[in-house]
Every structure is written in C-alpha cells, then in structure tokens.
C-alpha cells in the first residue's frame, strides 16, 4: 500500500504552501516566518475582498441605485484613488514605518468602512441611502490605496526576488480557494434573506475576515529602523519627471498598463449588473459564475509561478493579453448561467496567469530603493485609467447598451496588447537583499 507515502507527500506539500513550496524551506527561518504571516494575510484578505468585490455593486443596487450610479461609483473611486496613492507614496517616503501605515490605513480604517456599510440601511433612509453607501465604498477603496505604496515596499522587503513567482503562485492559490468558498457561501446567504439583510450579513463577515488579515500582516517582522528619504528625494509633482528619466522600461510598463486598464473598466463595473437586471440571475447564481473564475485559476497558478521564475513574466503576460480580448466578445452571445460559467472557466485561467506575471513584472521593473514612489506612480496611472474607462462605460451603456460596451472594451484591449508587445521588454533580474530584523 502506497497510501502512507502519498499521505506524507500531501502533508509535506500542505506544510510547504505557506512558504511558497520547497523553495521556501531553503530560506532563513525569519524569512520563512514572514512568508507564512503574509500567506495567511492573503488568505483572509481574499476571503474578505471577494465578498466586497462580487457583491458590493449588487448591495448598492438593492438599495435603489441605478446603472449610472454604479458606473459613477467606480469612476469616483478610481479618481479618488489616484490622489490617495500619491499621498500614500509621500507618506511612505517621508515617515517610513511602512507596515504601520498599511495596518492603520487599509487594515483598520478601510475595514471600518466595511462595517459602516452594514449599518447604512439602518441609520439612513430615503434617496441619501445610496449616496452614503457609495461614499463608504469609495472611502474603503481610498484607504486601501493610501496604504498601497507602503504595502508594496513591505512585500519587496519580505519576499526574495528569486522565489517570487513560486511564492505568489502558492499565495494566490490559497487566496483563490478562500475567495471561491466565501463567494459561494455569500451568494447562498444573500438569496436566503429578503431585502438587504443577506447582504448585511455577508458584509459583516467580510469585516471580521478583514480583521484577521490585518492581524497577520501586523505580525510580519520588518526592518525596525527605516531610513527616511530627504525632502528633495521624496515624491512630488516636481520630482516625477526626474524619477521617470532613465527608466524607459518602467515608463513603457506604466503607459501600457494605463491603456489596458482603461479597456478593462469600460465593461468591468457592469457584468454583475447585467446578469441581475438583463439576464435575471439571482445573487447565488452570480456567485457561482464568479467561483468558476477562481476555480479555473487555481489549476494553473503553481505552474504559472514556476514558469514565470524560469522564463520571465513578460512572455507569459503577452500570451494572456492576446487571449483576454476574446472574453467580452464571448459575453455578447451569453444567455444562460452555464454560458457565463464556461466563459469564466476560460477567463479565470488566463487572468490567473496575467495577474501573477504582471505583478512580478512590476516588482522586477521598479528600482529597489524607490518602491513606494514608483509603485504609486504606476497605480495612479492604473486608477486614472480605470476612472476614465468607467466614465466611458457609463455613457456607452446608457446610450447604446451592453453589447456596444463589450465591443469597445475588446477593441481597446487588442490595442493595449500590441503596445505592450512592442514597448515593454523583459527587465534585467536583480536579486533584492532582504535585511534581517
């Protein structure tokens, strides 16, 4: 009987997941411990965020919002995020204490906004309910973006470059599992209750799971003394041209990311709304279709992480970008839940590869001593592009309908893919020193 043999292999595989597989066991003990804390942070964060991402639009829709207000919420959130990212980079550069910034901003204030969303229908009434709910949703995103530059710096400090593909493959794997379970459970709970009660229950659960994420991130041991940059070296409007000069790889990556995210958000905010209002799917069916995306992505994450480390993330990202424009075209012909599930199975596989490789490509393209400022500039470009995409999407869906929206998104995705293939090169890998605390 080979059962004990396979049991040992499964046990070892499970034990190695939080450190990114067998590679992680070769790292120093303090690095392994940080990798575990960050891995569990990702698990709980994904469980919390998937509830918000998949159901916040439907929750606000149930409060009486229109399609235009849903699109406007996405646009306002993205414009506000650009400001908060800039402030977050300045904050990270000038005061340091990156972990503490993340814990206070996104980890505490952002999750407090989630809790407030639970009480909006109880404390407020009338037309103001929708706008107050939108305000808390926007604030939640804003606090998360304020902490993003500091969060990127913590990741850059914590995870050795030579194993990032495998580690993020493992971390994204458990995040996909957690997101899938909470999405299914949340969709079921929502359909069991009338009015907004189901939404309030699952959003309260998202708050609790978010606190668990914050605890794990707070437990990471980072460098106790952080060198502050001088005022002249800090990010500001005047210093941006100087930061970008001499880094054509990063500039090309940032500009193509802008076009790509503009294309994605032309249609992005409206898929769940379309399923509920036009295809008449229930919240549980919407959750099931989203789970198909997560489940298919899990099947490729570990292999994608390994390939990213061996071949470089650029080649894999180009491959995924060639296929992603097909997804909105497929939606034009979707009528039944199983149609959406098939599309999401295909899309989940491709998006899993894209998300992992694009993040690794970004980390590899940023000067290691300027992570907060450069990551903020990149994300500001992304959020402004998302805002403009949502604005265009809101106008198109109101005037022409969902199918024109999908066609426009597909065309701009193709343009972004061509630009990326021509402009972005594979960055030279540089091992990042992880300083022992």
Image: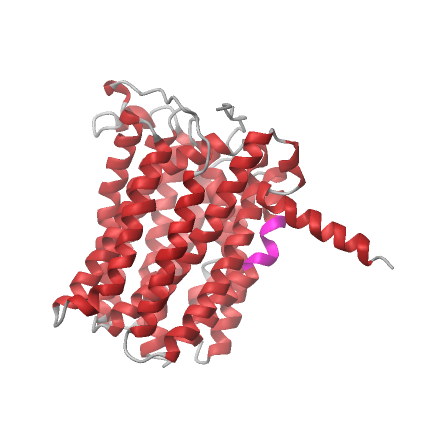
**Whether residue 278 is situated above or below residue 366 in the rendered picture:** below
Q: Position of residue 103 (x, y in %)?
A: 34, 40
Give the vertical position of 29 relative to 266 (above or below). above
| Residue located at (26% from left, 46% from top) | 81
Q: Tell how many labels.
A: 0
Closer-to-camera residue (321/194): 194
| Position of residue 291 measured from the top left corner of the image (x, y, whole percent) | 49, 66
Check the image and report above or below for 239 versus 127: above
Which residue lies at the image location 50% right of the left edge and 53% below the top edge?
Answer: 175
Give the side of residue 64 with respect to residue 41, left or right.
left
Q: How is the image coloured?
A: secondary structure
Give the extent of the magenta segment: 297-303
Q: Which image quadrant for residue 286?
A: bottom left
Measuring from the top left, give residue 348's x and y in whole percent: 51, 60
Q: Is residue 131 magenta?
A: no
Residue extending furthest toward the right: 1
Q: 406 or 210: nearer the eye? A: 210
The verdict on residue 301 being magenta is: yes
Residue 337 placement, left or right of 117: right
Q: Residue at x 34, y 68 (%)?
A: 201
Determine if residue 286 is in view.
no
User: Is there any visible trace of residue 17 in the rendered image?
Assistant: yes
Quarter of the figure with the N terminus? bottom right
Query: Is the magenta region chiefly helix, strand or loop?
Result: helix
Q: Is residue 114 above or below residue 403?
A: above
Residue 270 in picture, x, y percent from top left: 32, 67
């Amino acid at each position: 009987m080979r059962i004990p043999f396979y049991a040992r292999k499964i046990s070892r595989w499970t034990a190695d997941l939080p450190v990114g597989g067998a590679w992680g066991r070769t790292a120093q003990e303090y690095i392994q411990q940080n990798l575990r804390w960050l891995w569990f942070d990702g698990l709980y964060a994904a469980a919390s965020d998937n509830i918000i991402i998949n159901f916040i639009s439907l929750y606000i829709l149930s409060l009486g919002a229109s399609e235009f207000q849903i699109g406007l919420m996405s646009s306002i959130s993205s414009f506000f995020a650009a400001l908060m990212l800039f402030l977050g980079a300045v904050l990270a550069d000038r005061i340091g204490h990156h972990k503490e910034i993340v814990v206070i901003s996104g980890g505490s204030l952002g999750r407090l906004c989630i809790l407030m969303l639970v009480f909006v229908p109880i404390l407020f009434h009338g037309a103001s309910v929708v706008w107050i709910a939108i305000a808390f949703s926007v604030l939640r995103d804003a606090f998360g973006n304020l902490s993003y530059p500091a969060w990127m710096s913590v990741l850059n400090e914590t995870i050795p470059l030579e194993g990032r593909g495998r580690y993020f493959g493992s971390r994204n794997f458990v995040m996909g599992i957690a997101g899938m379970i909470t999405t299914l459970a949340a969709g079921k709970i929502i359909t069991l209750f009338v009015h907004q009660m189901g939404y309030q229950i699952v959003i309260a659960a998202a708050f609790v799971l978010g606190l668990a994420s914050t605890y794990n991130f707070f437990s990471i041991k980072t460098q106790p003394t952080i060198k502050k940059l001088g005022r002249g070296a800090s990010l500001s409007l005047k210093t941006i041209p100087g930061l970008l000069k001499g880094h054509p790889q990063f500039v090309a990556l940032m500009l193509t990311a802008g076009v790509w995210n503009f294309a994605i958000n032309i249609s992005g905010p409206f898929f769940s709304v379309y399923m509920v209002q036009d295809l008449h799917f229930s919240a549980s069916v919407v959750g099931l279709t989203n789970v198909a995306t997560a489940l298919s992505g899990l099947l490729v994450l570990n292999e994608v992480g390994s390939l990213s480390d061996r071949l470089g993330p650029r080649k894999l990202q180009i491959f995924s970008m060639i296929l992603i424009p097909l997804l909105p075209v497929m939606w034009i012909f979707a009528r039944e839940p199983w149609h959406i599930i098939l599309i999401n199975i295909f899309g989940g596989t491709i998006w899993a590869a894209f998300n992992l490789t694009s993040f690794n490509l970004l980390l590899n393209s940023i000067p290691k001593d300027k992570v907060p400022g450069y990551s903020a500039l990149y994300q500001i470009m992304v959020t402004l592009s998302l805002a403009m995409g949502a604005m265009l999407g809101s106008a198109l869906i109101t005037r022409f309908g969902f199918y024109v929206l999908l066609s426009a998104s597909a065309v701009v995705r193709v343009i972004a893919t061509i630009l990326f293939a021509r402009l972005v090169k594979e960055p030279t890998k540089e091992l990042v020193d992880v300083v022992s605390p």
